[in-house]
Amino acid sequence: MADSKVEIIRWSGNTSPGEETLKKILAEEDLHGYRWSNGPGDVYSAHTHSFNKVIYVVSGSITFGLPDSGEQLILNRGDRLNLPAGVAHNAIVGSEGVVCLEAHR
């Protein structure tokens, strides 16, 4: 990810991928993800990172907000977010909570 464009990649398969499938996809890109989770309605205030972030939703949902553009990005199971360094974002966890795999570039 050389530019500052936020990208969502929606899972296009007939069934949602499991955690092991998502780990394999990350490994094929030489990314080593870690797992994290949050309960329903948990909130992350707006912040930035000094690294590019890749997030896959394993289960549940999470909405990322981009304060600079006003966009709201809803991610569900199997969806991927490519978030470049320096992009301000916040997040609200969906009603079922969320489990994600995250890796840094």
Image (cartoon, rainbow, N blue to C red):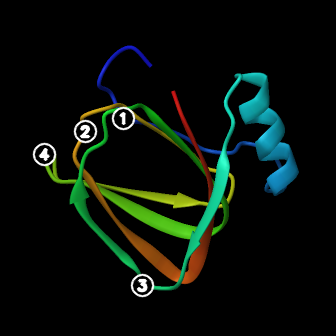
Determine whether label 4 and label 1 are within 8 Å by CB: no
Amino acid on which disc 1 is placed: Val
> Looking at the image, is mark 4 or mark 2 earlier in the sequence?
4
Determine whether label 4 and label 2 are within 8 Å by CB: yes
Q: CA distance from mark 1 to mark 3?
A: 23 Å
Observer-nearest residue: 78 or 24? 24
Q: CA distance from mark 4 to mark 2?
A: 8 Å
Determine whether label 3 and label 4 are within 8 Å by CB: no
Q: Which mark is residue 84?
A: none
Residue position marked by numbered label 3 in the rendering: 41
Residue position marked by numbered label 4 in the rendering: 68
> Does the image show residue 88?
yes
Residue position marked by numbered label 1 in the rendering: 6
Q: To which quarter of the image does residue 68 belong?
A: top left
Amino acid on which disc 4 is placed: Asp
Please tell me which residue is depicted at 83% across the width and 36% down the height of the picture: 24
Residue position marked by numbered label 2 in the rendering: 87
Q: CA distance from mark 2 to mark 3?
A: 22 Å
Measured as percent of width and height from the top left, residue 94 is found at 49, 77
Q: CA distance from mark 2 to mark 1?
A: 8 Å
Determine whether label 2 and label 1 are within 8 Å by CB: yes
> Looking at the image, is mark 2 or mark 3 earlier in the sequence?
3
